[in-house]
Amino acid sequence: MTEATPAAQAPSAVPILLNPHDRPLALLSLAELRSIESEAMAGLPPHTLMARAGYAAACFLREQLEHDAGATRAPVWIVAGPGNNGGDALVLATELQRAGVAVEVCMPVEVKPDDARWALAEARAAGVTITAAAPASFAGYGWLVDGMFGIGLTRPLDGVFASLAQQLSHRARQQGRVLALDVPSGLDSDTGNVVGASGAGVRATHTLTFIGAKPGLFMASGRDLAGAVTVAPIGLKHADHTGSLHNAAHSAVQLNAPALFAAFLPPRDFSTNKGSFGSLAVVGGDTGMCGAPILAARAALHTGAGKIHVALLGAGAPPYDPPHPELMLHPVDELPLDKMDALAIGCGMGSRARASKVLDDVLALDVPKLLDADALNLLSTDSALAAKVAARGAQGDPCVLTPHPLEAARLLGCDAASVQRDRLAAARALTARFASVIVLKGTGTVIAAPDGRVAINPTGNAALATGGTGDVLGGIIGAFLAQHLPPYEAALAGVYLHGLAADRLTAQGDGPAGLTAGELAPMVRKLLNQMFYPA
């Protein structure tokens, strides 16, 4: 008979379950999590963390069942892997069994660690049905639970576990109700990639992650595999209810949220005027490519900059923008760029010698700058221009660079696949090389500052996978620079609202398919006013 320990009893308090929405949660690396676990276990009775994790999962599922009439009476099916993630799954099964919820466990390989062996004994004592094989069909089940493998997996799923991952993923796509414990099995919690070049990963509709949130749940494949993420801190003092990590290094990664930038937005008092909100010049538009800078300028107009200029390099540009005559269009040589409050450079700029000369000239100006698109490509092929960007950052005047993965690869001298293998490492490498704030665009955009601050953005969806959305982002961030937000905070605000605009438009039925870049700016304006300047 298993000795009853304090950990073997269900905790008396309902566990805290955090929704990451709009919270600047610390995103913990595998190394940070192992350190927290080790320190916590040294001062707790045996099995405590596993008992808390399983109990939190049971509370989460019971809450879901209370609001899900279609699954209330159907049994919960749980797959338990051979390690501690399997132990968490077994505790979950025990708690559900004791609460009167029908439950079945599939354990293809018997659990091995001591904590998991304890959990297996508890499950057997509670009368949980445990089998070695999965049923032929999941049609009769309500929720399915992935408890195969958690963090730290170093090899691809194979054999029966790869097969089960495929079955769980199919269920998630077709009918939903698939919960992953800690992380979807097969997912690298640091990078958001599936472990192994051709490995399988579970696609869940929900993930309950323990101790703290992980970077991989919010970027790369992780956003698709994890579904809706909930955090269960399981009572550890290292991660408080706000998600802040005590004693963390200054470089700890955070989830981007309004709390990180709202205080830097300018007040809009009655006594303000257009000069209070800065002048932005969007520099670009070689012959035949004026659409990109005009898209960026329209976005800046909707983001609240006081005056918006478009400095065009090419010939044949329109004298004004008919939908928005508020924009002021000029040949680049006729606009005093040194008088601007900020510059957004690169949209439709081209790669001719004239573009290189204009970029060289503006880098000498003491004006906050965002570099995008063709400006980034020029940096990747001209070491002298790249050195000037790095020198400005070293002098305390960092630019904001907004590369997508291919542009980032060119800047780093590698390929896009290398960037995507570890997006956090790539963003940090770019900050080190250019002493600049980096916005590495993509699923889970990474925002990194030279001082070590890093954030992953949780907003945005496939609606942004269309031409021109990057130009819009550049205009939004440029507008915040013109309103005197510091570069890092301007980038955080721009990326967050740009993605949230896509989310809101998609919720209205205007995406993800067919959303155009130009539709984002009016929604950014609406969000900016609703969230930060309510009437």
Image (cartoon, rainbow, N blue to C red):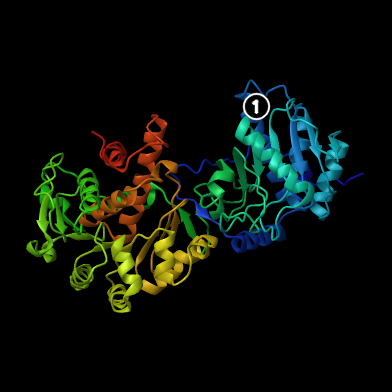
Image vertical order of residue 510 relative to residue 271, above or below = above
378 left or right of 139?
left
Q: Which quadrant of the structure image shows residue 385? A: bottom left
Quadrant position of residue 89 = top right
Residue 33 occupies which quadrant of the picture? bottom right
Residue at position x 77%, y 26% in the image: 100
* Closer to us: 381 or 500: 381
Which structural element holds mark 1?
helix
Asked whether residue 463 appears in the rendered view, the answer is yes
**Quadrant the N terminus occupies:** top right
Q: Position of residue 268 (x, y in %)?
A: 18, 44
Residue sitting nearer the eye, 39 or 215: 215
Identify the residue under disc 1. Answer: 65
Kind of residue at badge 1 = Leu
**In this rendering, position of residue 205 left or right of residue 219:** right
Residue 420 drawn above or below residue 84: below
Percent x, y of residue 296: 24, 50
Residue displayed at 33% across by 40% down: 516
Dot 1 surroundings within 10 Å: few (below 14), some, or many (20 or more)? some
Task: Give percent across and percent down for residue 462.
Answer: 44, 43
Q: Is residue 82 left or right of residue 31?
A: right
Residue 346 % position (x, y): 26, 61
38 or 71: nearer the eye?
71
